[in-house]
Amino acid sequence: GESVGLHLPTLSVQEGDNSIINCAYSNSASDYFIWYKQESGKGPQFIIDIRSNMDKRQGQRVTVLLNKTVKHLSLQIAATQPGDSAVYFCAENWSGGYQKVTFGTGTKLQVIP
Amino acid sequence: DAGVIQSPRHEVTEMGQEVTLRCKPISGHNSLFWYRQTMMRGLELLIYFNNNVPIDDSGMPEDRFSAKMPNASFSTLKIQPSEPRDSAVYFCASSLSIVGQPQHFGDGTRLSIL
């Protein structure tokens, strides 16, 4: 039979535009959230994190927004560049015990030059 | 600063052979994680250690898989005997603590079992 891999949602963005990647998390007890970027042939790379006592955190060209009411996380990338093309994963964790980090399935960002 | 170092980067071997993957975590990190990534299943956590002690190995697929962390700067993941369905990219990650801190990943070992 035909093998089917994970279907990654794909976001195509024009170079220079802003990108918004969304993530719904599952555990209402999660209090620590992380975004990772994975380029082809490499391991996931930490981008930015946010704790549940915040609803927004900014880094260099990236902003993470957290909405605990609807269990939603987003990553905004300003002035998207070709080097931003990658798969982006959100991850959640509950810091109250030895709970493993749970990764989402990922979103593929394609930057159109 | 040196990141997480994994070796080998690529491994091709025949089924039935023993495979050993190696990982050197970031110095000072006390938590270490082994993941497997495939197109079919995405990123799966296999096992993690805190202060060299295995905390949760519920992700290890079967008894053919074993992992050790003899000291704070070295861990191995062993598959014996290997099978074609073990073909995947295996990642090691480390973090300052087991929760509440980002994990830093190595570039993985691409394993192909023929």
Image (cartoon, rainbow, N blue to C red):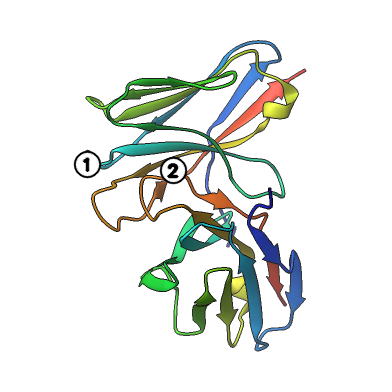
Question: Which x, y percent locates residue B92?
Answer: 57, 61
Asked whether the beta carbons under mark 1 and mark 2 sit within 8 Å of each other, the answer is no
Could you tell whether B80 is left or right of A64 in the image? right
Residue B56 visible: no
Residue under pointer 2: A104
Question: Where on the picture, by quarter, is residue A53?
Answer: top left
Task: Name the residue: 29% across, 31% down.
Answer: A52
Q: Chain of mark 2?
A: A
Mark 1: amino acid? Ala
Q: Say whether disc 1 or disc 2 marks the residue closer to the N-terminus.
A: 1
Residue B85 versus residue A72: which sits nearer the camera?
A: A72
Identified at 39% across, 73% down, the residue is: B54
Q: Is residue B47 above or below residue A6?
A: below
Q: Position of residue B61 (x, y in %)?
A: 45, 74
Displayed quadrant of residue A85: top right
Viewer-side residue, A113 vs B8: B8
Indicate the secondary structure of the residue bearing disc 1.
loop
Horizontal placement of A50 versus A12: left or right? left
**Chain of the residue where label 1 is placed in the rendered structure:** A
At label 1, counting other C-alpha atoms closer than 10 Å, the crowd grade (few under 14, some 14-19, many 20 or more) is few
Q: Determine the secondary structure under disc 2.
A: loop
Left or right: residue B6 compared with residue B12: left
Q: Residue under label 1, please give it.
A: A29
Of residues B85 and B54, the one drawn nearer to the viewer in this rendering: B54
Camera-side residue of A105 and A39: A39
**Identity, as a three-letter code, of the amino acid under mark 2:** Gly
